[in-house]
Image (tube, grey):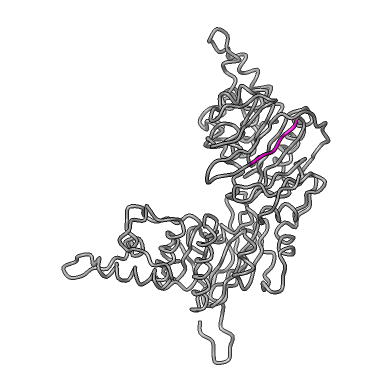
């Protein structure tokens, strides 16, 4: 659409009230974005705010259910990523998806190679143009080098070069700096500014507010799958953006009960895994819920997996009630009373084609057996007891867990580990993917367990859950602890600030 003389040109890209549902779950309730030509537009929000869904719709990975998407003022409908690329849209992801066995030049021109006489591949032309593209970006790369050996930063350069070769006018950068060094970040931001000055529109998604406020012209906030606001960067402060991102109240969803905090059960000292997390130290006491908080990539789950022994670590110690837990030995951790409910319950926590009973008793079968023979009666009795206590809704105990709802699957995983009578329960993203009513049940149960003297280490990406359930919050950012905040001092702003800023740890 072209306007008459004097008319304001339409935005490069515009989304109006875009929605996307996955079954009963509304991933995107009202996606709105207006990207102007020659601008860098920040898109921010908590984990689960709907940013990724919005990007996938723009990039043609997913179809919207309702709403409008316009390009230069004209309605568009992308059914494939090729449709989006053909319309001049490129998405640069945090972890580039290059073909590792192909060269830089081959990756840039993959699927649209140049051919010369007699149908032969014109490698010389691809090399020349690849070299020119990376030089234009201020990051010259050897066009013959295999992608396998490139750093994440250089892989992103290849992706950006590919987008320029496709004449992309809209470039979406999804957490592009998460795995980069400071020097690499500066280089990428310089490239982004150059592309903006050429008239391209860039959507920049980042949890790093220092980058957002130094690079971007406008900022859109999303929360719970919905559009909240769009402002000029010069008109808002970091604190205002944080309040918009986390503006929810902690209500009856979090039935936290008072518990007597007793002796230290878990002590983690100076735990370090090179390149993953560094110098992590904290304790969890009987009756206490300690929450590891932080943004995606902060290292929370990795710390929990190291404590349980699933992942190795380089230095530091883990002790349970004063007894050292052997490294990289889940069996030893279980014997000392540690239980881990993983984030990915379907692939790591359950045998999906097995029944409820088999899953609940999976970790205690040796305890239920006599002389190596498992009594079906004892197994059924134990499974019934835990299924009843956790209010697992199932037609029968032999019902395959794949047929249960997400919330009931989570209860079965909990039952499996609680049946081992642990002293410490590590629970990673306890309510991800389950409905609000079941969330309240899981929170009630977790609180009851702590009230009965269980030590609980929770990992959560949901700030209301962190604030509603934790007695103490240990905040991580990029593998380092930035704060330890007591319940009475924990606010949405203080936790989010610590998650987005390098800072000293407060006791």
Between 324 and 374, which is closer to the camera in this rendering? 324
96 w.r.t. 120: above or below = above
Task: Locate residue 40 relative to residue 234 in the image: left or right.
Answer: left
Residue 482 image point, x, y percent: 68, 49
What span is colored magenta in the figure?
A: 280-285
Residue depicted at 73% across the width and 49% down the height: 464
Residue 109 among those drawn in magenta = no
Q: Which residue reaches farthest left?
A: 118
334 w.r.t. 494: above or below = above
Between 71 and 242, which is closer to the camera in this rendering? 242
Residue 47 image point, x, y percent: 63, 53
Q: Magenta span: helix, strand or loop, mainly?
A: strand
Residue 235 image point, x, y percent: 71, 73
Residue depicted at 70% across the width and 45% down the height: 436
The image quarter in which residue 310 lies:
top right
Tell me the quarter of the image containing the C terminus: top right
Between 477 and 258, which is closer to the camera in this rendering? 477
Residue 438 image point, x, y percent: 70, 40
């Amino acid at each position: 659409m072209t306007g008459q003389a004097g008319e304001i040109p339409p935005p490069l890209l515009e989304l109006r009230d875009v929605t996307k549902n996955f079954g009963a779950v509304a991933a995107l309730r009202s996606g709105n974005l207006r990207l102007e030509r020659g601008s860098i537009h920040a898109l921010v929000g908590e984990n689960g705010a709907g940013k990724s869904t919005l990007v996938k719709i723009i990039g043609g990975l997913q179809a919207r259910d309702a709403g409008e998407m316009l390009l230069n003022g004209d309605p568009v409908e992308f059914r494939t990523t090729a449709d989006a690329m053909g319309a001049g849209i490129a998405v640069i992801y945090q972890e580039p998806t290059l073909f590792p066995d192909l060269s830089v030049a081959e990756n840039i021109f993959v699927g649209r190679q140049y051919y010369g006489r007699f149908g032969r591949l014109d490698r010389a032309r691809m090399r020349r143009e690849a070299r020119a593209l990376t030089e234009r970006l201020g990051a010259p790369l050897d066009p013959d080098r295999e992608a396998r050996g490139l750093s994440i930063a250089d892989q992103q350069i290849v992706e950006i070069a590919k987008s320029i070769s496709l004449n992309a006018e809209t470039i979406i950068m999804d957490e592009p700096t998460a795995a980069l060094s400071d020097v690499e970040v500066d280089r990428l931001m310089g490239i982004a500014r150059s592309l903006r000055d050429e008239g391209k529109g860039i959507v920049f998604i980042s949890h790093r507010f220092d980058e957002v406020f130094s690079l971007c012209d406008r900022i859109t906030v999303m929360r719970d799958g919905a559009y909240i606001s769009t402002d000029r960067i010069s008109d808002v402060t970091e604190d205002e953006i944080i309040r918009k991102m986390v503006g929810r109240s902690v209500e009856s969803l979090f039935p936290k009960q008072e518990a007597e905090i007793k002796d230290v059960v878990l002590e983690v000292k100076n735990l370090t895994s090179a390149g993953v997390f560094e110098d992590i130290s904290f304790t969890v006491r009987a009756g206490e819920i300690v929450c590891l908080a932080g943004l995606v990539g902060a290292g929370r789950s990795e710390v929990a997996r190291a404590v349980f022994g699933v992942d190795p670590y380089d230095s530091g110690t883990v002790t349970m009630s004063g007894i050292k837990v052997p490294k990289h030995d889940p069996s030893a951790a279980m014997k000392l009373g540690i239980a881990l409910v993983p984030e990915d319950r379907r692939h790591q926590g359950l045998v999906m084609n097995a029944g409820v009973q088999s899953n609940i008793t999976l970790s205690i079968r040796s305890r239920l057996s006599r002389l190596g023979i498992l009594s079906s009666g004892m197994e059924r009795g134990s499974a019934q007891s835990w299924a009843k206590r956790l209010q697992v809704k199932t037609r029968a105990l032999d019902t395959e867990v794949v047929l249960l709802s997400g919330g009931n699957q989570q209860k079965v995983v909990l039952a499996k580990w609680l049946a081992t009578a642990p002293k410490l329960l590590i629970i990673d993203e306890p309510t991800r993917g389950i409905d609000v009513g079941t969330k309240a049940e899981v929170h009630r149960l977790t609180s009851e367990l702590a009230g009965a003297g269980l030590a609980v280490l929770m990992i959560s990406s949901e700030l209301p859950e962190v604030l509603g359930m934790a007695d103490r919050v240990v905040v991580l950012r990029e593998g380092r602890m930035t704060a330890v905040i007591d319940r009475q001092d924990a606010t949405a702003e203080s936790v989010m600030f610590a998650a987005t800023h390098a800072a000293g740890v407060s006791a």
